[in-house]
Each structure stands twice: as C-alpha cells, then as structure tokens.
C-alpha cells in the first residue's frame, strides 16, 4: 500500500502541490508568506512534498539528510513550526481524499488506507518536528554567542591602549563576559591602559558599578590600568547618591578625555601639526 501511495503522489505531483499551496496560503500567517517570493514558496513547498515521497522510496540516510536540509531552510526563512504541523495534516488530507475520490476502494481497503496513512505520516511528523527544534536551538545558540562577542568587544586603538565600548544594560551574564574579554584582551594586546566606555549604558546602579569595580580590580591584577569614561551628569549624580566608591578608578566625562589621559599615562600626547 505504501508503494501505491508513493506512486500516486509522483503521478499527481503538480496537482497535489497546487492544492497544498492553495490550502497553506489560505490558512497560514500572511506575514510568513509575504517574507518570500512566490517562486521561493513554491520551491519550499515542492521540497516538502519531496520529503513525503522520500520517506517511502529513499534510503534512511538520504531521507534523514533531506529532512535536516529542509529544517535548516525553514529556520533560515524564519518560518514557525506551525508550517510543518499544519503542512503535514493538510497534505495527508489532500492525498487521502483524492485517492478515495479517484479510486475504487472497498470499505476494507479504505480502512487499510487510513491505517497506512497514520502509520506512514506519524514518524515523518515527529522527525520533522525534532529536526526543526534541533536546528532552531542550534541557530539561537550560535546567534547568542555572536551577540555576546559583539556585546563586550575589546578594541585596540593605540599601542598599549584598548577600549571596551559598552551599550545597553549590564546583567550578571554580560558582566562575566566583560570580565573574560577584558582579561583575555589585556594579555593578548599587551595593553597598559584599558578604557571602559559607558556612554551607551542607560543606567548605572549599584550592581553595575560593582561589576565595573570588579573588572577594574581584575585588570589591575594583570598589570594594566583601568579607566572609566563616558560618565554623563545624570550617571555621576546616581553614583554619588548611591555612595559608590570609584576612588581607585580614573574617570572622565568623555572618551576623548579618556584617550588623552591614557596617552599621558603611557608618556605620549596628541599634538597639532602646523601646515
């Protein structure tokens, strides 16, 4: 019976694909459809139908490879998992109803066909969901790593001087990353002065200040000087009102002043050249 189903799908592929695409467009989120071209939607739908046939005709290795590739494509397009769940239900109903309407089946054969459909599609459903979930988790994990790397970069600007510009809120996890990047970068770039620029940090509370003080102490332990730059008037008022002690950290209001102080610390300065 499985070969009969596969043969029917291959023989009526274009009609089935047309019916399935029409059904999915009518019942899917319009935003999902609008993100891709009609040709891309058609190709993705055709690839989905090919997986259905592959589960019946191809080897397990080839079938699982197609499932993995398809899941990656769906995640890359940003489509939700409902595309798979609704898609499998829709394609099974379309194929089943067409086969019943066009075939001359006895009641026993109809029951057997229904049983075969359930036995055939349930594993496909589970495998596609598992592959999608695994791909999504891997993608999110890679994105998180990339964002973390961008969230606390240490940039060498002059010989022995590096800057870490911070933007956004600082939580415990990000503070740990800041500490790691600072210590690794100081050693890697052989920095003598590190400027932590908090111009883009909206709020400096006790916890944020505590993390900054810890980072400065750690930098000092590896033989470098830490400076805090970009302290706006409202941030200065907050630090004073909270009673936060930054006496052991050199502070400046702007990054430019911080760079000038860092150059002076390394026995250099910025001079104007007469033309």
Image (cartoon, rainbow, N blue to C red):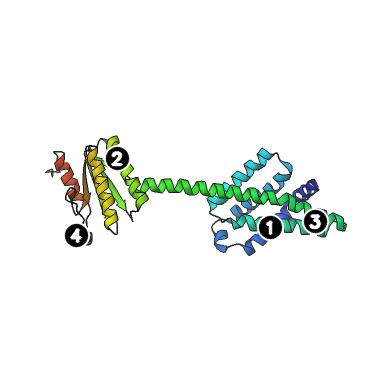
Q: Is residue 25 above or below residue 130?
A: below
Q: Is residue 158 left or right of residue 8?
A: left
- The answer to whether the residues at label 3 and label 2 have Cβ atoms under 8 Å apart is no
Q: Earlier in the sequence, mark 4 or mark 3?
A: 3
In front of the other: 93 or 226: 226
Q: Which residue is mark 2?
A: 183
Q: Earlier in the sequence, mark 4 or mark 1?
A: 1
Q: Which residue is mark 4?
A: 240
In front of the other: 167 or 249: 249
Q: What distance separates the C-alpha of mark 1 from that of mark 3?
A: 16 Å
Q: Percent position (x, y) of residue 46?
A: 66, 50
Q: What distance separates the C-alpha of mark 4 from that of mark 2?
A: 28 Å
Which mark is in front, 2 or 1? 2
Crowd band around label 4 with a 10 angstrom C-alpha radius: few (<14), some (14–19), many (20+) = few
Q: Is residue 144 left or right of residue 115?
A: left
Q: Is residue 62 left or right of residue 266?
A: right
Q: What distance separates the C-alpha of mark 3 from that of mark 2?
A: 67 Å
Residue 99's tag is: 3
- Element at label 1: helix
- Element at label 3: helix
Which mark is in front, 4 or 3? 4
Which mark is in front, 4 or 1? 4
Which mark is in front, 3 or 2? 2
Residue 253's tag is: none
Answer whether residue 257 is visible to the viewer in this image.
yes
- The answer to whether the residues at label 4 and label 3 have Cβ atoms under 8 Å apart is no
């Amino acid at each position: 019976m499985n070969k009969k189903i596969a043969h029917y799908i291959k023989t009526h592929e274009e009609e089935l694909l047309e019916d399935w695409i029409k059904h999915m467009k009518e019942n899917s989120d319009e935003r999902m459809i609008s993100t891709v071209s009609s040709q891309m939607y058609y190709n993705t739908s055709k690839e989905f139908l090919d997986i259905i046939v592959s589960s019946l005709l191809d080897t397990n290795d080839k079938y699982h490879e197609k499932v993995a590739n398809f899941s990656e494509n769906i995640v890359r397009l940003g489509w939700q998992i409902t595309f798979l769940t609704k898609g499998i239900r829709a394609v099974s109903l379309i194929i089943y109803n067409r086969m019943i309407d066009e075939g001359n089946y006895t009641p026993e054969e109809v029951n057997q066909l229904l049983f075969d459909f359930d036995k055939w599609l349930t594993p496909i459903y589970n495998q596609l969901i598992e592959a999608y979930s695994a791909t999504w988790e891997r993608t999110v994990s890679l994105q998180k790593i990339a964002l973390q790397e961008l969230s606390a970069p240490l940039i060498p600007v002059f010989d022995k001087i590096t800057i870490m510009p911070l933007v956004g809120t600082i939580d415990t996890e990000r503070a740990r990353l800041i500490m790691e990047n600072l210590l690794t970068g100081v050693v890697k770039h052989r920095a003598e002065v590190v400027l932590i620029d908090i111009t883009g940090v909206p709020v400096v509370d006790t916890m944020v200040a505590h993390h900054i003080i810890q980072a400065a102490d750690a930098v000092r332990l590896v033989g470098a000087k830490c400076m805090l730059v970009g302290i706006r008037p409202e941030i200065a008022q907050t630090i004073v009102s909270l009673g936060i002690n930054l006496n052991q950290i050199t502070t400046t209001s702007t990054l430019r002043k911080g760079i000038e102080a860092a150059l002076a610390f390394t026995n250099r300065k910025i001079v104007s050249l007469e033309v």
